[in-house]
């Protein structure tokens, strides 16, 4: 049982060719920063970034913040385009690594969608059980037991002892039958 | 003498059965958090913060700060036994700690790590005891320009002392400021940067950012490594402890040096991670055994651990005395103060004596409790790491999601957490520093307020920031730090020519 996980990892990791280089990623991130900076500055300008009778307007401070983001992002972008990034040819992420990262990220995003629809408790139980069974190759019995047990423990801790209400789902609340 | 009396009073506050119990709970939770990948001091405390809303502030901060001490201790366990730093500040501990464990000296390495952690923290707490009240008294005279200058110094020192590219530090920090500006403007009540999206009225909470950046981001990073744990066994018995303790005084010079580096880096917001690296580097250069570093030298464990704990602890000094946190974890604790209805800053020392001194006293006790727990229970904590990642990972994601939701009871925050998680992963890999971003997100509103108040006082003239000796000095120092990357380049250029 414990052996299956490292075996799975080694199988997934085997592809070590670069999926993305550092330089490409650097360009994408700095260009995004440049755009964000300009948007922040533009919206602040719209709101009023000047000096009014009664002092600085609401956009005064964020306007300069936006401009500095844009300038820093632009500089990093320029450096990356000129090939001045340290270790720019280096690998940002290998294909095998990317697959591993996505194997965690994609289920996590699906999990958040499930929370949105059915609330934290049901989504968490299914997520933990699914993750263990699918990625960890545990038996369904073990996976479901642990998933349900975790959700139940969270339920006791929050709803019963600390009386903090957690999200119950916007589509369907499976706990409605119990009065929660 | 005044401080000693206050401290004794603090001990009487901290030494109730409930608080002592919370201390042990906190330290134990902290060590578990420190051992687990994806959970660390900052986001661990952020997740547990909502559970303390109904507690007494003093008890709550004692528990949360003890989680922090525990996390600092816990990082060392994984570094030494598994060569996996549980926390960023314990990376330098792996250099000599892991080779020692491979040579069968794990017990010795762990004892040295824990003991030097304790020494570092103790020195920092003593410093806090005597220095924090002075700083707070001094800061009572501060007006908005002075406060802005201190904020400015905080942010400039990130740029001046940061290791990576200065523009990346600047961009990350300003992104934090921009995120802080989203929502209602506290001065005019206007809505900023929400682009007509009403749910953004609340803005971005830094607790959600911390949970995403450090929690989800860290999980993605650990996943990439493939995490195949091949750990060494830890056996710490009384004999090993005593033998190691007998060796430690030999390295008193390294200890003192590391304490100084740690305290300095903690107060100026360098943080525990650079402090540990710097201390390791200095020890390597100055030690007679320097060339053997990396092969399992006791000194190579002492130096980073002492500095990391000294820095982690002294980061609480500016938070308590000025209301300006020196690290992301201190920022989360500061967020706690605000939620419990306490205004951090110099007035705290006058208005909430019980709270402040109870906390300081609990730092002494908490670290002692931590030392005892780690020395006795190492095998237990090491066993946690043997739980397969395919069980740990989804549980940590679930804990993070719950933590993000409980901050404001908002589903949208869970989405933001995922967004920050991906951002944390990418930023970490491209060397965009996250600490300045988190601090800017926390301090953004207050830095802006003090800036705007100063501008109102001066009718919009920047001269106000140089209007007296104090504020002028701090501003001058900040500007020097801000342009330090440029200055040092120029100096190197001149040196080459001359």
Image (cartoon, coloured by chain):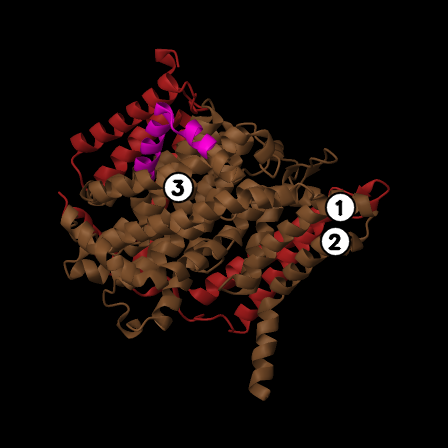
Chain colours: A red, B brown
Q: Residue at x 71, y 44 (%)?
A: B144
Q: Nearer the viewer, residue B195 or B169?
A: B169
Is label 2 in a helix, a strand or a loop? helix
In percent of width and height, residue B196 lies at 66, 36
**Residue hosting label 1:** B454
Q: Is residue B162 left or right of residue B104?
A: right
Mark number displayed over residue B156: none
Label 2 close to label 1 by CB (< 8 Å): yes
In percent of width and height, residue B322 lies at 59, 43
Residue B26 in sight here? yes
In percent of width and height, residue B6 lies at 50, 34
Q: Residue furthest bottom?
A: B498
Decide whether the magenta segment is chiefly helix, strand or loop.
helix
Q: Is residue B270 left or right of residue B236?
A: right
Is label 3 in a helix, a strand or a loop? helix
**Residue hosting label 2:** B465
Neighbours of disc 2 within 10 Å: few (<14), some (14-19), many (20+): many
Q: For mark 1, name the chain.
A: B
Q: Nearer the viewer, residue B366 or B77?
A: B366
Is residue B288 one of those drawn in magenta?
no
**Residue hosting label 3:** B68
Label 2 vs 3, first from the N-terminus: 3
In percent of width and height, residue B84 lies at 28, 54
What's the magenta region? B8-30
Q: Residue B91 lies in what quarter of the image?
A: bottom left
Q: Is residue A165 left or right of residue B343?
A: left
Q: For mark 3, name the chain.
A: B
Label 2 vs 1, first from the N-terminus: 1
Q: Which corner quadrant holds the C terminus of chain B?
A: bottom right
Q: For mark 2, name the chain.
A: B
- Distance from Cα at disc 2 to Cα at disc 1: 8 Å
């Amino acid at each position: 049982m414990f052996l299956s996980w490292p075996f799975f990892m080694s199988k997934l990791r085997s592809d070590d060719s670069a999926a993305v280089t550092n330089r490409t990623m650097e360009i994408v991130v700095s260009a995004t920063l440049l755009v964000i900076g300009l948007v922040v500055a533009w919206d602040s300008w719209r709101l009023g970034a000047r000096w009014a009778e009664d002092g600085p307007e609401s956009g005064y401070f964020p306007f300069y913040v936006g401009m500095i983001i844009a300038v820093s992002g632009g500089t990093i972008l320029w450096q990356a385009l000129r090939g001045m990034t340290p270790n720019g040819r280096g690998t940002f992420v290998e294909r095998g690594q990317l697959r591993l990262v996505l194997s965690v990220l994609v289920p996590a995003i699906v999990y958040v969608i499930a929370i949105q629809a059915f609330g934290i408790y049901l989504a968490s139980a299914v997520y933990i059980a699914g993750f263990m069974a699918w990625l960890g190759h545990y038996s369904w019995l073990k996976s479901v037991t642990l998933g349900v047990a975790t959700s139940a423990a969270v339920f006791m801790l929050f709803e019963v002892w600390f009386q903090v209400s957690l999200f119950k789902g916007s589509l369907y609340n499976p706990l409605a039958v119990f009065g929660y | 003498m005044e401080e000693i009396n206050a401290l004794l009073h603090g001990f009487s506050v901290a030494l109730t059965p409930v608080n002592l119990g919370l201390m042990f709970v906190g330290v134990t939770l902290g060590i578990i958090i420190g051992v687990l990948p994806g959970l660390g001091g900052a986001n661990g405390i952020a997740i547990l913060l909502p559970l303390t809303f109904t507690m007494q502030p003093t008890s709550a901060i004692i528990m949360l700060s003890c989680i922090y001490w525990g996390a600092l201790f816990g990082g060392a366990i994984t570094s030494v036994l598994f060569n996996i730093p549980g926390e960023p500040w314990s990376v330098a501990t792996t250099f000599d700690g892991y080779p020692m464990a491979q040579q069968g000296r794990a017990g010795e390495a762990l004892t040295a790590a824990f003991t030097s952690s304790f020494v570092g923290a103790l020195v920092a707490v003593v410093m806090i005891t005597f220095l924090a009240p002075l700083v707070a008294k001094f800061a009572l005279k501060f007006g908005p320009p002075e406060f802005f200058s201190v904020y400015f110094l905080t942010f400039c020192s990130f740029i001046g002392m940061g290791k990576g590219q200065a523009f990346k530090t600047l961009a990350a920090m300003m992104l934090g400021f921009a995120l802080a500006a989203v929502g209602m403007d506290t001065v005019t009540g206007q809505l900023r940067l929400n682009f007509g999206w009403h749910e953004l009225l609340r803005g971005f909470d830094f607790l959600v950012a911390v949970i995403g950046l450090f929690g989800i981001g860290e999980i993605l990073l650990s996943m990439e490594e493939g995490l195949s744990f091949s750990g060494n066994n830890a056996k710490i018995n009384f004999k090993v402890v005593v033998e190691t303790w007998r060796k430690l005084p030999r390295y008193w010079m390294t200890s003192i040096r590391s304490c100084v580096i740690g305290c300095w880096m903690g107060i100026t917001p360098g943080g525990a991670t650079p402090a540990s690296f710097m201390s390791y580097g200095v020890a390597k250069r100055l030690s007679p055994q320097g060339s053997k570093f990396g092969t399992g030298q006791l000194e190579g464990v002492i130096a980073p651990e002492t500095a990391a704990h000294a820095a982690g602890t002294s980061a609480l000094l500016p938070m308590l005395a000025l209301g300006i946190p020196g690290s992301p974890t201190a920022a989360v604790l500061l967020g706690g103060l605000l939620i419990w209805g306490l205004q951090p800053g110099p007035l705290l020392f006058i208005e909430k004596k019980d709270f402040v001194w109870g906390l300081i006293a609990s730092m002494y006790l908490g670290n002692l409790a931590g030392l005892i727990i780690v020395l006795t229970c190492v095998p237990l904590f090491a066993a946690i790491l043997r739980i397969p990642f395919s069980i740990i990972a989804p549980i940590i994601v679930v804990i993070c999601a719950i933590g993000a939701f409980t901050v404001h009871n908002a589903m949208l925050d869970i989405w933001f957490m995922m967004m920050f998680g991906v951002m944390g992963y990418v930023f970490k890999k491209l060397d965009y520093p996250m600490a300045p971003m988190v601090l800017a997100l926390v301090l953004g509103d207050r830095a802006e307020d003090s800036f705007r108040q100063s501008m109102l006082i001066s009718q919009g003239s920047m001269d106000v920031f140089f209007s007296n000796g104090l504020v002028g000095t701090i501003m001058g120092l900040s500007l020097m730090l801000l342009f330090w990357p440029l200055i040092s380049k120029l100096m190197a250029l001149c040196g080459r020519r001359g």
